[in-house]
Amino acid sequence: MIKIIEYIERGLIWGIILLMSLILVLAFVDIVYVIKEKALAPPLFIIDANGLMSLFSLFLVLLIGLELLETVKTYLKDDIVHVEFIILVAIIAISRKAIVWDFKQYTTEQLVGLAIMILALGTTYFLVKKADVTIKLKKGSRQDQQ
């Protein structure tokens, strides 16, 4: 019975990898399309600040997807969840929010909350890298490994 569950788990992970790859390819095509549209719109080859911010946002979303794909691939290959990859995805996601932040739309308290999240994630990443710890997940058990 456990073997069947492991085969199902492997199949699901492969499905996630294939779907994420497809989504990332489509996101890349979308980025190319948006760049083409913005560059060819009058005035030619001029992209304003708002256009650049939306492009950077698209690039960062693609980067988040690539990091998530790397995490799933690592789990499939080694049965290891690298905590630093997960934290990096969170840092990139929060950084994306900070980069495209519209100061007219959000309050100071929300900006402080974002800053606290960035600080907490940066500290966590530093501590995880300094400790050099990965969490090994194998057949339902959890072990710390250095």
Image (cartoon, rainbow, N blue to C red):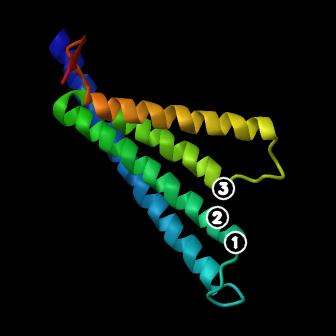
User: In the figure, is residue 62 to the left or right of 130?
Assistant: right
Say which mark, if any, is on residue 49: 1
Going by the numbered disc 1, the residue's amino acid type is: Ala
Relative to 26, does residue 38 appear above or below in the rendering?
Answer: below
Provide the residue designation for mark 3. Answer: 100
Query: What whole-number distance in Å separates the C-alpha atoms at marks 3 and 1?
Result: 11 Å
What is the secondary structure assignment of the residue under circle 3?
Answer: loop
Going by the numbered disc 2, the residue's amino acid type is: Met
Q: Quadrant of the C terminus?
A: top left
Q: Nearer the viewer, residue 137 or 34?
A: 137
User: In the figure, is residue 22 to the left or right of 140?
Assistant: right
Query: What whole-number distance in Å separates the C-alpha atoms at marks 1 and 2?
Result: 6 Å
Q: Residues within 10 Å of mark 3 (few under 14, many from 20)?
A: some
Q: Position of residue 110 (x, y in %)?
A: 75, 37
Name the residue rendered at 39%, 53% in the picture: 22
Provide the residue designation for mark 2. Answer: 53
Relative to 134, does residue 58 appear above or below in the rendering?
Answer: below
Kindly check if marks 1 and 2 are in contact, taking CB atoms under 8 A apart as contact: yes
Whether residue 42 is visible to the viewer of this picture, yes or no, is yes
Q: Nearer the viewer, residue 97 or 126?
A: 126
Q: Position of residue 125 (x, y in %)?
A: 40, 35
Mark earlier in primary sequence (2, 3): 2
Q: Position of residue 9 (x, y in %)?
A: 27, 24
What is the secondary structure assignment of the residue under circle 2?
Answer: helix
Kindly check if marks 2 and 3 are in contact, taking CB atoms under 8 A apart as contact: yes
